[in-house]
């Protein structure tokens, strides 16, 4: 599943950008208590994780399952924040809306044994203007053909 947005200013780039989105999901449990989301290391791409839902899976026990997210704040410092406290009897699922974080992001099952499924979108933003310019430059390089100077006519 992919969604493309031609002009997105949410990702912080100055000019028009291309935004692609893909479904994201991970399951946390006592066996796998955390998941770290990282984007590719390409220079012109920014990776974001938009968390949408956190829900208990089949076989969850009657206990509190606290899910915590660790990411960078606006000052570039890493902070951890609990985003859901789920219990099978009273709150088996939480909708986070469009909780968007820039990669890297670690999602941790802070307490409880789960299973807890965290889902949302993996957003990839690229500077469309820069990629269009590089494509145009490549096309121009291919089209340039050296020309010979014109011959001068001699007067009779």
Image (cartoon, rainbow, N blue to C red):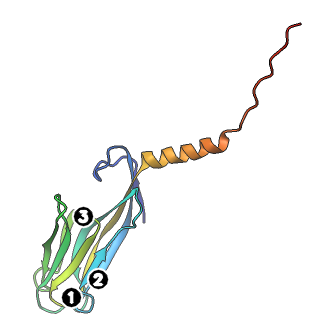
Q: Is residue 99 above or below residue 88?
A: above
Q: Dots 1 and 2: beta carbons under 8 Å?
A: yes
Residue 114 position, x and y percent, is: 21, 88
User: As drawn, is 125 to the left or to the right of 102?
Assistant: right
Residue occupying the point 23% across, 76% down: 107
Sooner in the amino-acid sequence: mark 1 or mark 2: 2
Q: Quadrant location of residue 57? A: bottom left
Residue corresponding to mark 2: 27
Q: Which mark is residue 143?
A: none
Q: Dots 2 and 3: beta carbons under 8 Å?
A: no
Mark 1 residue crowding within 10 angstroms, few (<14) / some (14–19) / many (20+): many
Residue corresponding to mark 1: 114
Residue corresponding to mark 3: 101
Q: Where's the N terminus, which quadrant?
A: bottom left
Q: Is residue 60 above or below residue 36?
A: below
Sooner in the amino-acid sequence: mark 2 or mark 3: 2
Residue occupying the point 54% across, 47% down: 135
């Amino acid at each position: 599943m992919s969604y493309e947005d031609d002009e997105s200013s949410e990702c912080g780039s100055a000019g028009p950008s291309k935004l692609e989105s893909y479904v994201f999901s991970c399951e946390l449990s006592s066996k796998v208590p955390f998941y770290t989301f990282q984007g590719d290391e390409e220079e012109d791409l920014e990776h974001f994780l938009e968390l949408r839902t956190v829900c208990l899976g089949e076989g969850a026990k009657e206990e509190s399952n606290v899910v915590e997210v660790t990411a960078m704040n606006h000052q570039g410092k890493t902070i951890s924040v609990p985003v859901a406290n789920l219990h099978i009897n009273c709150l088996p699922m939480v909708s986070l809306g469009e909780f968007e974080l820039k990669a890297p992001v670690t999602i941790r099952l802070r307490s409880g044994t789960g299973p807890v499924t965290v889902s949302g979108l993996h957003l990839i933003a690229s500077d469309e203007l820069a990629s269009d310019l590089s494509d145009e430059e490549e096309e121009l390089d291919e089209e340039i053909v050296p020309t010979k100077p014109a011959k001068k006519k001699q007067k009779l």
